[in-house]
Amino acid sequence: MARATSGRQSVLTRKVNALLTFVETSRNETKPVTTPSISESEASRPNTVERLATIRRHIAAVQKKISAVEDERETFDAFIDQLSDSE
């Protein structure tokens, strides 16, 4: 049972690390990008509509990943409960 629990922890750790990497990548992608062909005043104003759409897409993707991790955790919990009951 200890092996099953440590295996579950390592799987969840990998999934959480992947989720954190995804969030970091998403954060970097939502930073405003300036181009030299735009005047300085225009460059200081981020395209809020575009950024908002990108942020909403990333939020939806993160929520989807979180629910997938929660579903997997519940599956592992049920598996460990079965192992505990059989012992």
Image: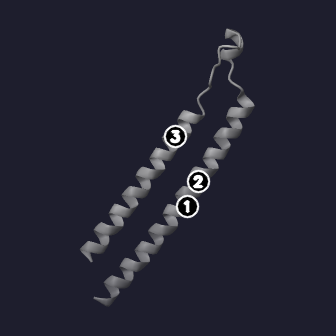
Pick the front one: 85 or 13: 13
Residue 37, position as x, y percentages in the image: 70, 14
| Residue that badge 3 annotates | 25
**Tag 3–tag 1 contact (CB < 8 Å):** no
Q: Residue at x 27, y 77 (%)?
A: 1
Q: Is residue 34 left or right of residue 1?
A: right
Mark 3 neighbour density, 10 Å: few (under 14) some (14–19) many (20 or more):
few
Amino acid at dot 2: Gln
| Residue that badge 1 annotates | 67
**Tag 2–tag 3 contact (CB < 8 Å):** no
Labels 3, 1: front one: 3
Amino acid at dot 3: Thr
Q: Label 2, secondary structure: give it.
A: helix
Give the quadrant of residue 54: top right
Mark 1 neighbour density, 10 Å: few (under 14) some (14–19) many (20 or more):
few
Numbered badge on residue 63: 2
Q: Label 3, secondary structure: give it.
A: helix
Mark 2 neighbour density, 10 Å: few (under 14) some (14–19) many (20 or more):
few
Amino acid at dot 1: Ser
Q: Residue furthest bottom?
A: 86
Q: Label 1, secondary structure: give it.
A: helix
Give the color scheme: rainbow, by chain, secondary structure or one colour. Answer: one colour
